[in-house]
Image (cartoon, rainbow, N blue to C red):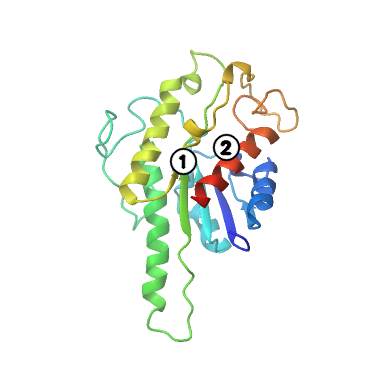
Amino acid sequence: MKGKRILLYGDSISSSSYPWYKSTLEELTGAEVYAGGFPGYTTSRLAQDAQLQLIYDYKPDIIICLVGGNDAGVKGEVGTFGATDEVLVEETDIARDYSGHAFIQAVSHIIRKINQHYDMDENTHSSSADSISPEKPFIVFGTTLPQKRSNRFNKFSQPDNWLRKRDAVVECCEKYKVPCIDFYTLCDWDFSKEPYYTSPTDIHTNKGIYTMDGLHPNQKGYEDMARIVYEELAL
């Protein structure tokens, strides 16, 4: 990965608000890493053309997508294409901007939209000797991180909801043959020792062992994430 360009795409966990993901990955890989996350964005917003343009503008060699931090994952809202007991949904039309309603549709839309963009560029420029088509980046999706938020009465704090999002990402990765880093399983963090999340997010005060606030990783958490990414990509 030395000398490659890696784009971290997703919500605040992949953003420049928290510098350790980028810095640790750069140290481990020798790559140039850009933290391109959009704080507060749901996966539906990350599937829209306006946000996906960041990927095309940056021209990465590797894209690491980590989404779902701002999605509740409530039963009936995640969806499936047939692999789980969630509500069955259909694929979106990638010829249009994202307009789906289920979490899995947004994940699928991101994967297919990126593939379409680079496949279209390749076809457009294949007959022109003067045009150089951008190489298709290596796409990797990560499952949602384990989370601890307010309490068991809050939909964001229910383990079944996190697992549902995790399963949807795994389903999409298997369907489209996209490598999947299962952070949900591989981040072996004891959340009984992490704080409860309270809003607004404090991006400076560390209150936990692996997380700043029960949701966003702290330096130790990001170093563990970066190690997992490095080991998974090196396989």
Q: Residue at x 38, y 75 (%)?
A: 124
Q: Residue at x 39, y 59 (%)?
A: 115
| Amino acid bearing label 2 | Gly
Q: Nearer the viewer, residue 81 or 6?
A: 6
| Amino acid bearing label 1 | Thr
Name the residue that disc number 2 marks: 40
Mark 2 vs mark 1, CA separation in Å: 10 Å
Residue 58: percent from left, percent from top: 58, 61
Residue 223: percent from left, percent from top: 65, 39
Location of residue 100 by image quarter: top left
Residue 173: percent from left, percent from top: 37, 45
From the viewer's perspective, tell me whether residue 7 is left or right of residue 102. right
Labels in figure, total: 2
- Residue 105 to residue 112: above or below: above
**Image quarter hosting the N terminus:** bottom right
From the viewer's perspective, tell me whether residue 68 is left or right of residue 34. left
- Residue 218 to residue 47: above or below: above
* Residue at the bottom extreme of this rendering: 129
Secondary structure category for the residue under label 2: loop
Location of residue 89 by image quarter: top left
Checking the image for residue 43, the label placed there is 1
- Residue 79 to residue 121: above or below: above
- Residue 197 to residue 69: above or below: above
Location of residue 13 by image quarter: top right
Residue 109: percent from left, percent from top: 38, 49
